[in-house]
Image: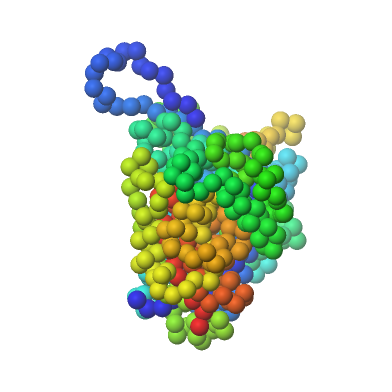
Amino acid sequence: MSASLPDETIDPNAPVANMDYFMALEFKETICPVVQRYTDGLLAGKIIGHRCSQCGLVYVPPRGYCPIDVLETTEEDEVELADRGIVTNYTVVTPVQYYGQEATEPFAKVSVLLDEPGGMLSLQDVLEVPVEQVRIGMRLEAVWVPESDRTVEEIGNRSWGSADGCILGWRATGEPDVPPDQFNDRVF
Amino acid sequence: MADIAIIGYSQSPSWREAELTEPQFLFPVISEAIDHAKIERREIGFTCAGSCDYLSGQTFAFVMNLEAVGAWPPISESHVEMDGAWALYEAWVRLQAGDIDTALVFGSGKSSPGNLSEIYPLQLDPYTLTPLGVDPASMAALQARALIDAGLVTEREMAQVVARNRRDAMNNPRAQVSGDFDEDALLAEPYLTAPLRKHDLPPISDGACAVILATADKARAVCERPVWIRGIDHRIEVHQPGMRDLTVSSSTQIAGKNAGVGNAPVDVAELCVSFSHEESVLRRALGLAENVKVNPSGGPLSANPLMAVGISRFAEAARQIAEQGAHRAIAHASSGQALQQNMVAVLEGD
Ligand SMILES: [Zn+2]
C-alpha cells in the first residue's frame, strides 16, 4: 500500500480541497484441487467438467458440488467435454478508454454451450468473425494455443469458464445454425 | 420479544490457509448444521449470511457462498458485510414477525489470500487513519497500553489469558492454536508491537460457522435441548478511536444491560477476545463474577476465522448449554477497531 507523492503544482498554502490516495491490495490465491484438475486438463488439451449424478448438469470448471442439488461432486463425476458448441448468448462490448482498457474496437463475448456431454463456457472470445455476424445458434469450435505455449497462470478459483492461456478463442465451423428451441434454458 | 432458540450449529476447523474455496468449505458446515437441527433444508424460511468480500479480494464473493446453501428453488435470503453474528441478529429480528419459523445463519471468511494489516485500515477514517496504515495490532496495542497505564491489566495477566485459552483449546478439535504454555516463557518472548507479543494476537484463520434458529413452537417440536436466546442487543461507539476512552467498553456495557446479563448468575461466557487484554475490558463491561468461565473453547485467541469468529461464540456458548450442562451463557461478538461495536446475547437452557 502506498500513498501518492505530493503534487508540486499545488499551492501549499491553499486550503486542502482534495486528497489523492492511491493504494493496491495484493491477494495470493492457491488453486483448489478440483480447479487444479481442470487446469491440468487444459494444458493437456482437454476440457474437464463435473457432471452432477442427480440432475445431470455439467459444471465447467468443476466446482466440487452441484449447487442445485446441494450435492458434493468428486473426481468420480469428472467428464471430458467437447471443444465444440453453440453460441447461446453474447454481448458486444464497445470499449471505453478507462485506465487499463487495452481494447479499442468493439468485441463480442459469448457463452458457448458445449456439445454432448454438455457444459457451458461463458465470456469466450470469437475469432475471425465480425461482431455484427455473431449470433445465437452459431456453431463454434475451440482454437487451442499450441501445446508448448499453453499457460494457466491467469486461471484462478474464481475464473468461471475461463480457459485463458490454453484456448485462444472460438471460430465458426460453418455448419448450419442450431434453432434456439433446442437449447432453451441454457442461456448462461 | 418472542423467544427464539438455537436448535443446531456447526463449525469448520480453523485453518491457517484453507486449500478449499470459501463455498467449498462452507458446503459441509451448512449441511451439518441442518442435520444437527434435525430438520429438512426446505423447512428453512429465511437465510442470512455474514462475510466480507475484501478478505478474499473477490467482488460478490458473498453471492458465490450461496451455492453452499441450496438456493434452488429460489429462497428468501439476505447478507450482511459483517460477522455472521450480525446475520444471526437479522434473522432473530426476521423471526419475530412470526410468519416463518426457521432460519439458517452463517458466517465465513477466507483471509489467507490477502494481507490483513493492509485490508483492515480501509475500515477506518479515510482522511486521518487509513493513510497511516493503522492495523488491528497497532490499534490493539494502543488499547493495551491505555489499560496498563491505568492499572487495569498487567502483561502477566495478558499472558495468563493466552496460556489458559491455549490450554482450553486442547479440547477443541477445531482450534488452530493450542497447547500447554508456561506464562513465564510467554512473557520472555519479544514484543511484536509493544506492549503486545505475538501470542497476544489472534491467529489468522480461514473457516466457517452455521447456526439454525427457530421459533419456540418449532424448537419444541424438533429439538430435545433448545438453547433460548433470552436477550440480544448490539451497540456501536464513535468511529474515531481518539474520541473514545479505550480502557472501557461502553457499548458492551449497554448491550449487556439490555440483553439482561445481570438478571441472573452466568455460568459461562464466550467472548470475542481477539487480543488478550480485551478479556479484562469485556469482563468489567459485562460485570462478570470471578467464577464465570470465559472461553472454554479457547476463544478467538485459538481460532479466529474472520466473519465467523463472532457467530462461533454463539455456537460455542450454545454447545456449553446443550452438551456441557451449563444453564446460562453469554455470547459476545465484536466488530470495528478496538472493540468499537459489540453484540451481547444471553442464552439459556430449559
Ligand atoms: Zn445437480
Going 45% across and 85% down the picture, which residue do you hit?
Answer: B217
Going 66% across and 39% down the picture, which residue do you hit?
Answer: B189
Please state which of residues A77 and A103 is positioned toward the viewer in this rendering: A77
Please state which of residues A95 and B158 is positioned toward the viewer in this rendering: B158
Where does residue B316 sit, x and y in percent of width and height?
57, 66
Q: Is A53 on the left-hand or right-hand side of B225?
A: right
* Location of residue B187 by image quarter: top right
* Location of residue B164 by image quarter: bottom right
Where does residue A18 sit, x and y in percent of width and height?
29, 27
Would you place residue B324 above or below residue B172 in this image?
below
Going 71% across and 30% down the picture, which residue do you hit?
Answer: A149
Picture colour scheme:
rainbow
Does the image show residue B338?
yes
Going 40% across and 53% down the picture, which residue do you hit?
Answer: B249
Where does residue B267 sit, x and y in percent of width and height?
53, 71
Q: Is B253 on the left-hand or right-hand side of B20?
A: left
Does the image show residue A49?
no
* Location of residue A58 by image quarter: bottom right
Where does residue B343 sit, x and y in percent of width and height?
42, 60
Please state which of residues B197 and A49 is positioned toward the viewer in this rendering: B197
Q: Is A78 on the left-hand or right-hand side of A99?
A: right
